[in-house]
Image: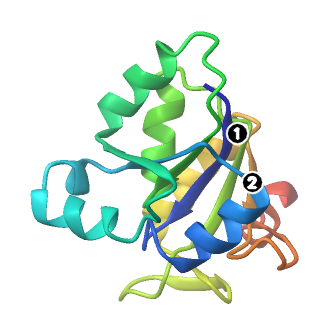
């Protein structure tokens, strides 16, 4: 199951994803990976209503996502994987999911978070999880839409200066 993009976006499925990234990446399926959304019928219904009828989408827990990816063998379906935080990516990677690059698309302002890019706000937990990903050699590409110039998250967090 090729992951054409693994994206952190706290809004998960929305217009930038279903129009911008879908047009650029041409995934066969969007997988929304969130324990919170997958276990709430109401949230699942709301998010699935944002998916165009001609696009296949799944809402899975992190555990279900890990099991699905690791058992997919040579399935050729192109997947756009959406998560809401760096911590979720760390859980996937620590379970053996191969993720060479992460697109950080939108981590919006909340109390206690500091801005590192126009669309990325982080707290200490986010920084620690980004550091874990960086230390594993995972590229951290900050970009909310495909046409925007990339923001090097590791450089913004000064990981490459240590």
Q: Which residue is mark 1?
A: 135
- For residue 155, the mark is none
Disc 1 + disc 2, Cβ < 8 Å = no
Q: Secondary structure at mark 2?
A: helix
| Disc 2 residue crowd, few under 14, some 14–19, many 20+, Cα 10 Å | some
Q: Which residue is mark 2?
A: 25
Instruction: Tell me if residue 67 comes above or below residue 117 in the rendering.
Output: above
Q: Residue at x 73, y 64 (%)?
A: 23
Q: Secondary structure at mark 1?
A: helix
Q: Position of residue 32 (x, y in %)?
A: 41, 51
Instruction: Tell me if residue 21 comes above or below residue 39 in the rendering.
Output: below
Q: Residue at x 35, y 89 (%)?
A: 111
**In this rendering, position of residue 80 left or right of residue 155:** left
Instruction: Tell me if residue 13 comes above or below residue 93 in the rendering.
Output: below
Q: Quadrant of the N terminus?
A: top right
Instruction: Tell me if residue 94 comes above or below residue 70 in the rendering.
Output: below
Q: Quadrant of the C terminus?
A: bottom right
* Quarter of the figure with residue 45: bottom left
Outermost residue toward the front?
A: 54
Q: Nearer the viewer, residue 97 or 2?
A: 2
* Quarter of the figure with residue 74: top right
Q: Position of residue 76 (x, y in %)?
A: 66, 23
Q: Residue at x 48, y 75 (%)?
A: 14
Compare marks 1 and 2 and give the one earlier in the sequence.
2
């Amino acid at each position: 199951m090729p992951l054409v993009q693994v994206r952190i976006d706290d809004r998960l499925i929305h217009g930038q994803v279903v129009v911008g990234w879908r047009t650029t990446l041409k995934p066969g399926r969007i997988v929304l990976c969130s324990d919170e959304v997958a276990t709430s019928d109401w949230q699942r219904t709301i998010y699935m209503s944002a998916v165009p009828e001609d696009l296949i989408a799944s809402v899975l827990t992190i555990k279900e996502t890990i099991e699905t990816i690791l058992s997919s063998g040579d399935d050729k379906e192109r997947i756009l994987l959406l998560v809401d935080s760096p911590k979720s990516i760390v859980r996937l990677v620590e379970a053996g999911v191969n993720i060479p690059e992460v697109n950080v698309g939108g981590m919006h302002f909340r109390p206690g978070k500091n801005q590192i890019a126009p669309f990325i706000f982080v707290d200490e937990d986010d920084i620690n999880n980004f550091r874990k990903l960086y230390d594993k050699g995972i590229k951290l590409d900050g970009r909310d839409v495909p046409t925007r110039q990339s923001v090097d998250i590791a450089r913004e967090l000064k990981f490459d200066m240590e």
